[in-house]
Every structure is written in C-alpha cells, then in structure tokens.
Amino acid sequence: MTDLQQPYFDIIVVGAGNAALCAALAARERGVSVVVLEKAPASEQGGNCPYTGGGFRFVHNGIGDLRTLLPDLTDDEAGRIEMAPYTSDDFRNHLTTVTHGDTRTDLMNTLIAQSRPTIDWMTAQGVRWDIYSRLSAIVGAPSVIPNGVGLTAWESGPGLINMLTTSCRRAGISVLYETEMSGLTQDDSGVVVGVVARDNDETYRIRSKAVILACGGFEANAEMRGKHIGPGWELAKVRGSRHNTGDGHRAAMAIGAQPIGQWDGCHGTPIDIDAPATGDIQVTDQMPRRSYTLGISVNLKGKRFVDEGEGFAEQTFVSMGQAILRQENGIAIQIFDSKARPHLEGRYGGSRKFEADTI
C-alpha cells in the first residue's frame, strides 16, 4: 500500500453525485483543499442522479416566486401554468405522512428551513432549472403542476451532474474517476484521518482532516437488500447505478459506526418489465412507468391491489413501487383506455403493450 503523490487534502468527498458535488463545492467555498473520489468511470458518474428527472422539493410561493429561478420563462408561458405555493407546513405534512411520523424532527425542520436557500445557492453555483413539464395536463389548457416538485434541473438528472461537475472543475476541485474507497483510516485515538482507495490494481492511502461519505446506498447490492430491506428485495430490479453497493455503510461500520434509522425502507418506483437488472446510463430516466394514475393496475390474477388515484404520481410512486413488488413475481399490468392514452408520459413509447376492444 502506498500514499498518493499528493498525500493530504483538507476534505475527501467519496462519491460524485448531487450531494457529493454540492458538498465539495461548499467546502471549496471555505478555502479548503478538496478531492472527490468516484468509483464509476466518468461516463457513469453521479450515482443515482442521472437516472432521475432531477426534481427538487422546496418551499416556494408558487409560479410567480419561481420565475426568479427561470429567467427564460416568458410571461405567456408563466400565465398558462397553475402551481400552488408549497409552504413549510405542506412540506412538513408530506414528510410526516410518507414516513408515518417516523422522522427526526430536528433534521426535518433543518431540511425545510434550508430548502429554498439551498436552491438559491445551487443556482449561484451554476445550476439551471426547468419546470416539471412531464406533469403538464392537456395540450392547450393550463398546465396544473403539483406544487411538491417545484422545479427540475435543466436536462434532468444527467444535466444536473454535468452542471455541478463543470462548477467543480471551475473551482479547482479534482475528481478521481474509477477510484474506489475501500476503507477508512484512523489515528491512534480513533479519529478518521483519511481513506484507503483502489485505482485499477493499486491500493493507496489518502490523508485528510475530514471525510464526507456521499457514495449512495446499497441498492445495487442484492445481499444487503435482502438482509436489510427484506425477503424478495434481493430480486428487485435496480433503476439506478450499479456502483451503489453500500461501500460507505460497510466502511463506516467496519470501524465501529452504529446503524441508525429505517434500514428496511427504500425508494422504489414502477419500472418497465423489460428494464435491465441495474440502471443503463444510455436510457437513464426512461424506465419508470408513472402514468398509473390515469388507469388501473392489476396483478397477474387480474386483481387491483392499490388505489391508483390516491394522489399525484410524484407523491405516490414510491408506495406504488413497493406494492407492486409484493405481488406475484413482482409484476403488475397497467391498463388504460383510449381517452387516457394520449396523456401517458412520453417514456411509455418504448413499452411492451397489448391492445383490445375491452378488458
């Protein structure tokens, strides 16, 4: 094992997704030296972020307020958008509802209070925004957009990673690709003083004042899914990055960190039956199937198993994904009539489909 040629940085950030790059930029703003370690090659950088629509939930006062973040939005376009304010109470109620009240109040309050300032800070870092247009209604009519997802990053998740990576380069932050963090190092008193990293066949140490673990979850690790989330989840298809295998969790627990929180919960979504076992960077966010609110969903026995219209899809797709996995073979069939078909998300275009005069 050797030391890196530049053996010391103030901050090591493990991961190169949205949270990681924002952490690196925030640290660099304070004048410290930063290095980012990314397990994936540059073409697959970003963890799960490139596989998302890049939507952000934050406190705002409606479309008029959001126009300060959308300089290219014309008066005519803004006039055809209906979006209610998303208040602190809305945010709090949503969090407590989806977690069934099992959430840390102090962290929740910080998240809510800092949500809009964080969006403003990201804007200052060079992030551009767009309206969540996939949720628009009938063409030519007002677009009623759920207020919970205020904006999306320009060009969705892949665009967000590109913008933040560009900002990091501009700030003089090095991103080391195909560099896997395999462990944390400590001094004699137990303080974390760096990482053990692997690059191709070489293993070396990088020393630092602090290490930020922002390397995603363990969703691409079938063994950890089955152990922590429960039976059946080891067979689930992974919409996101194949590189998120729990490296940070295992490294931290190896030196005595204690697990906390709800390890048996996860973020799931309905995805196409022909989706690959793990995310394909070539199709990014094209696999989710979230127009279920426009029809009915049945299992292989032809039975409905959920209320598809409980709320907007952006509010219910996680519970829907989990409900589908509980069905036989983890499969559901979405059924739409001819009136709904024109309003399906564009990404349904490549789906396997069957047509009939009646059910």
Image (spheres, helix red, strand yellow):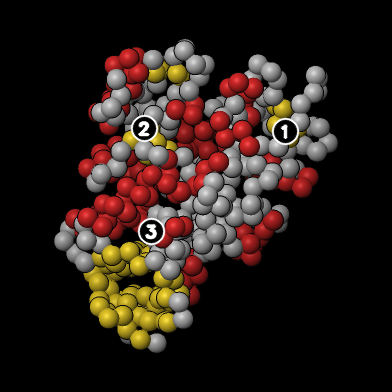
Q: Residues within 10 Å of mark 3 (few under 14, many from 20)?
A: many
Of mark 1 and mark 2, the one earlier in the sequence is 2
Looking at the picture, which amino acid does disc 2 mark? Answer: Asp
Which residue is tagged 1?
A: 353
Which residue is tagged 3?
A: 16
Q: Residues within 10 Å of mark 1 (few under 14, many from 20)?
A: few
Q: Are marks 1 and 2 in contact (CB under 8 Å)?
A: no
Secondary structure at badge 2 equals: strand
Find residue 93 and report its image quarter: top left
Residue 243, horizontal then vertical, whole percent: 51, 62
Residue 74, horizontal then vertical, whole percent: 29, 20
Q: Residue at x 42, y 76 (%)?
A: 199
Looking at the picture, which amino acid does disc 3 mark? Answer: Ala
Of the pair 221 and 153, the residue shown nearer to us:
153
Residue 96 falls left or right of residue 153:
right
Q: Residue at x 29, y 16 (%)?
A: 75
Q: Nearer the viewer, mark 1 or mark 2?
A: 1
Of mark 3 and mark 1, the one earlier in the sequence is 3
Secondary structure at badge 1 equals: loop
Looking at the picture, which amino acid does disc 1 mark? Answer: Lys
Q: Furthest residue to the right?
A: 301
Of the pair 262 and 302, the residue shown nearer to us:
302
| Residue 312 appears in the picture as rendered | yes
Residue 65 falls left or right of residue 257:
left
Residue 92 falls left or right of residue 348:
left
Secondary structure at badge 3 equals: loop
Residue 130's label in the rendered image is 2
Of the pair 309 and 198, the residue shown nearer to us:
198
The N terminus appears in which quarter of the rendering? bottom left
Between the C-alphas of marks 3 and 1, the distance is: 37 Å
Residue 40 vertical placement versus 303 (above, below): below
